[in-house]
Amino acid sequence: MPTDAQLTDDEYRKLRETITSAIWDELDPLEQRIEDEERIPYDIVLPVLRRCGAFGLLVPRRFGGSGLSIARYLPIIAEFAKIQGGIRVLVHVHNSFAHALSEIGDPAQQAALLPGAATGERSLAFALTEPDHGSGADLGTVARRDGDGYVLDGRKWLITNSDIASHFMVFAKTAPGAVSALLVERGAPGLTIEPLPETMGCKGGEHGLLTLDGVRVAAPALVGREGQGQEHLERALEISRVFIAASSLGTAERSLELSLRHAQSRVTFGRPIAERQAVQRYLAEMAIDVYALRGMLADAAAKWDAGGRIPAESSMVKQFGLEAVGRVTDRALLVHGGIGYTRRHPVERLYRDARLNWLEEGTPTIQYLVTARELVAGYAFADAFDGAA
Ligand SMILES: Cc1cc2nc3c(=O)[nH]c(=O)nc-3n(C[C@H](O)[C@H](O)[C@H](O)COP(=O)(O)OP(=O)(O)OC[C@H]3O[C@@H](n4cnc5c(N)ncnc54)[C@H](O)[C@@H]3O)c2cc1C
């Protein structure tokens, strides 16, 4: 696969500055509106995301994206995880899919989809989860060979960006035990998309129900080879789990920052609560989680960027990240007292938003399963800590 030159440090710094200002000056002010209306105002949000380059972060430069390394992408998705969660999810799913396609798509699929993905003209979604079956080899959606193409039947749900996606990467069985990935265009005859009820946190986006009723796609819609879907899935989820861990980091960092500020300004019994040892312990515990998560993320990113596979690391950091953000957002509520429980305070939202991190890219039992599988298969904890990052 051809590789592109990386952005220079200066170009990367400018991109970070542009995105950071878009996040805080243009997107963060929409928080209450999105939380109240439970809808992302796409007419405002999509142009901002397009303008600041948020859709092309992981798209290779030859297709018009920024082609960031994972180490450079993680701080950006972490920054998105500090503001209203529905926006973070939209950006995450799009970039994750674009990254997967840039790794597993064939040249024709990449040329057809990635330039539009880089600008955000094309919006992408990932359709794996089903109402009637488990994920992976248990899938109930089938893709039958039919002449020079496939016919798909089945149901998918909780599919993020289902209201805006131009294309869905649908995982379906092409033979007993064989999973394949196929690209289905929005508007394909036989594809219907219905909204599902609003979520607890990360509000405003749509995570809809897709019904595929005899949806016909041509052979070039197949991603990779027939039966290669499980392999694709594992590769895509491996790095996407690291993205979720980075999202946990961003939410935890914001919760800590707000808690520290609140503890220094809230005075009870004549002293700021930050001077009370019991409150200091909450703050210190939050900082420990943030610090540990940063270290794990740096290690996972460095290994991936060096060309390694990281199934164990990605599941471990994803699991640690959700536990860490769970503890940190819980302590943020404790530090804030009653006001933190009200709808007008960001820690209430951060607490709800964080909860999605338990589900995205697999639940905890799946992360334990992958980590243990790798350990039993000989994952090298033997290459002991040598002091290097
Ligand atoms: C807001 C939101 C957005 C989402 N976006 C997407 C998306 O864009 N695309 C997509 O495909 N999916 C998406 N999902 C779905 C999400 O990835 C799944 O909900 C999640 O992976 C859990 O799968 P499930 O809902 O089928 O739960 P289940 O598989 O039914 O799990 C229920 C419980 O059983 C446990 N369990 C299930 N099977 C096993 C097993 N074999 N061994 C041990 N324990 C097991 C689970 O850990 C869990 O505790 C989204 C979900 C939400 C809430």
Image (cartoon, rainbow, N blue to C red):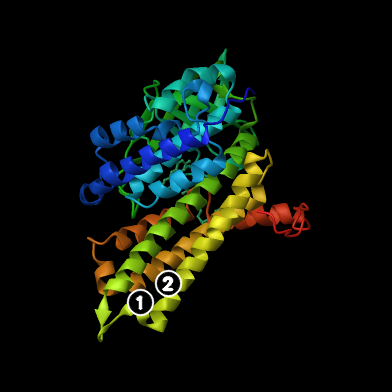
Nearer to us in this view, 62 or 337: 62
Q: Is mark 1 within 8 Å of ligand 1?
A: no
Q: Is residue 358 above or below residue 174?
A: below
Q: Is residue 247 visible?
A: yes
* Residue at image point 44% right, 44% down: 76
Q: Is residue 34 visible?
A: no
> Label 2 belongs to which residue?
283
Q: Residues within 10 Å of mark 1 (few under 14, many from 20)?
A: many
Residue furthest top as drawn: 148
For the residues bearing labels 2 and 1, Cβ distance under 8 angstroms: yes
The image quadrant of residue 53 is top left
Nearer to us in this view, 172 or 10: 10
> Label 1 belongs to which residue?
274
Residue 263: percent from the left, percent from the top?
32, 73
- Would residue 29 appear left or right of 69 to someone viewing this image? left
Amino acid of disc 2: Leu
Disc 2 and disc 1: Cα gap in Å?
9 Å
Amino acid of disc 1: Ala
